[in-house]
Image (cartoon, coloured by chain):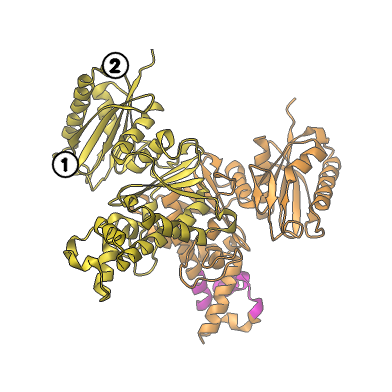
Chain colours: A yellow, B orange
Amino acid sequence: MEKPYVVGIDIGGQTAKIGIVNARGEILGQTTIPSNQHTDATLFIETLCAAIQTLASDNHINISEIRGIGVGAPNGNYYKGTIEYAVNLTWGGNNLIPLTDIMSKRLSIPVVLTNDANAAAMGEMAYGAARGMKNFIMITLGTGVGSGIVVDGKILYGHDGFAGELGHISIVRNNGRACSCGKNGCLEAYASAVGVARTAREMLETTSRESLLRTLPYEKITSKDVSEAAQQGDKMAKEIFDFTGKILGEAFADFVAFSSPEAIILFGGLTKSGDLIIKPIIENMEKNLLPLWRGKVKVMFSQLKESDAAILGASALAWEL
Amino acid sequence: MEKPYVVGIDIGGQTAKIGIVNARGEILGQTTIPSNQHTDATLFIETLCAAIQTLASDNHINISEIRGIGVGAPNGNYYKGTIEYAVNLTWGGNNLIPLTDIMSKRLSIPVVLTNDANAAAMGEMAYGAARGMKNFIMITLGTGVGSGIVVDGKILYGHDGFAGELGHISIVRNNGRACSCGKNGCLEAYASAVGVARTAREMLETTSRESLLRTLPYEKITSKDVSEAAQQGDKMAKEIFDFTGKILGEAFADFVAFSSPEAIILFGGLTKSGDLIIKPIIENMEKNLLPLWRGKVKVMFSQLKESDAAILGASALAWEL
């Protein structure tokens, strides 16, 4: 008999979310464990495996009924099954962690790993806005900017498994902002939630214009604050989104010239700002597209609940095992 | 019996090259016809088909022994078999030309079409520097800048067949040079042979520095002149190549972040400048790569004779029919 369930796991800097999913894409049970309590990867993975077993038995599912486990994690290497030098994980820093080897031996279930943005793209293709699409690009606008590129119905992994680092293409070539990757001028330094807050601070500092944002503690301004101010009609806050959207739109035009996707799908915290962010993106992408693509490439929001998307995406990967 | 031959055709703005190729990649016979003598596409295609028949009979090959015909042409659409709005072709301007339909009916042989840079990538993978590679990017540095992107051993065509227009990604976002495509600041406006000559004229005009290039008629300076001056030790000419290589290297770093290729392979007139162009490319690409890719991505020249590459590339496509 076919095994009827898969497990999807989303490992982030603070927590790991675990869900058991059936073939209809329904999450039958889910749990969350902290991911920042260990500095030793082996101990974290043991905790994770134990949590999977508990979750299964709590839902009256036998481990032998689980067909595979899909894991999305920062710096996850699909080809090797390793998490490589993931500085955002307390136990991942200077290491190359053979995650899939350890887990599959421990649980006797096949395990597949990819990075979080690729997992989100898989979820969107299986259950979300990209159903029926074979060529699209997923852009995650969270603390950082991630990407999952789908070509001919498959994630683009490239020669080494690390393709799709679109957060680190150069947007500003001279005197660009420092990025967490060590380079300057990367897309992520401008278009992430952190980048939006940085733009706000720069505008407040370099102008004396009035803004609701001046009433907030300067160092603690977040992209959510900017969004709320813009929704209240604050001009500067709107301009911050226009600036962010311009940078994203220009970058998207280059992405289209690369892989000619049917759509670019946006996911993550910044998408909660809705029209504030997507309107300037579309306007500036269109301006920068070659004539042959104008009016033809969709830009749209994810159709998955943020809390479910990462689990569903990782689980979609496991069905392919 | 398997049909033992294919035909490869390279349609350019001035000429169309036609070759009959065997399974070992040997060109058994070739011919060239002008491609700029017609304004009516149907008449040109008839001339082309007649030339194929003559070439076959001159080489004692029966048309029925030809398995397929591969065609590389500007704006060639792989999915539809059409040449679309190819402004560089005297008979292609405002049209959508169903090339493969007309040819395959006329000759009773299957015909497949792609753009010229994709054909070059196919040739490189079948017979050149990319043998054994499954992920690489072909960049053609000629009058324009073209690209063919190979992912998992296949040309990346994208949603509509037009993926891989890397000559038109934005390199200079403000006050960039006008590009033939109608946009400003495209890679092609700087890194093509025409772009190099333009850089030379800009440097001559905006400085009063000495240079061998000042002895040449200003409007007629070519990238070949710049290359020759640099080889004679001319400082300005060397700087022109450094500038061009910097722009290409920065763009290549972004391409790597997209598809993580094993290699980027250079083809076309500018590659004759050898180290003058490839050294600054590699230096600037490395500077702009994410740490995980540094020292790992090859940049190399095509290993096919320029006169053969286009025919071989188009013919490689025909074997897949």
Using the rendered view, name the quadrant where residue A226 is placed.
bottom left
Residue at 31 percent of width and 55 percent of height: A192
Question: Chain letter of disc 1?
Answer: A
Give the residues in magenta: B219-241
Q: Are marks 2 and 1 on the same chain?
A: yes
Q: Which residue is mark 1?
A: A36
Disc 2 + disc 1, Cβ < 8 Å: no
Picture mark count: 2
Amino acid type for the residue under numbered disc 2:
Ser
Q: Residue furthest top?
A: A1
Residue B104 vs residue A54, the one in the foreground = A54
| Secondary structure beneath label 2 | helix
Q: x and y percent of residue A114 in the render?
A: 35, 38
Amino acid type for the residue under numbered disc 1:
Asn
Residue at 45 percent of width and 60 percent of height: A250
Q: x and y percent of residue A38 in the render?
A: 14, 39
Q: Residue furthest front?
A: A232
Location of the N terminus of chain B by quadrant is: top right
The local crowd at label 1, few if under 14, some if 14 to 19, many if 20 or more residues have their Cα within 10 Å, is some
Q: Which residue is mark 2?
A: A64
Say whether residue B222 is magenta.
Answer: yes
Question: Distance from label 2 to label 1 (Cα)?
Answer: 29 Å
Using the rendered view, name the quadrant where residue B146 is placed.
bottom right
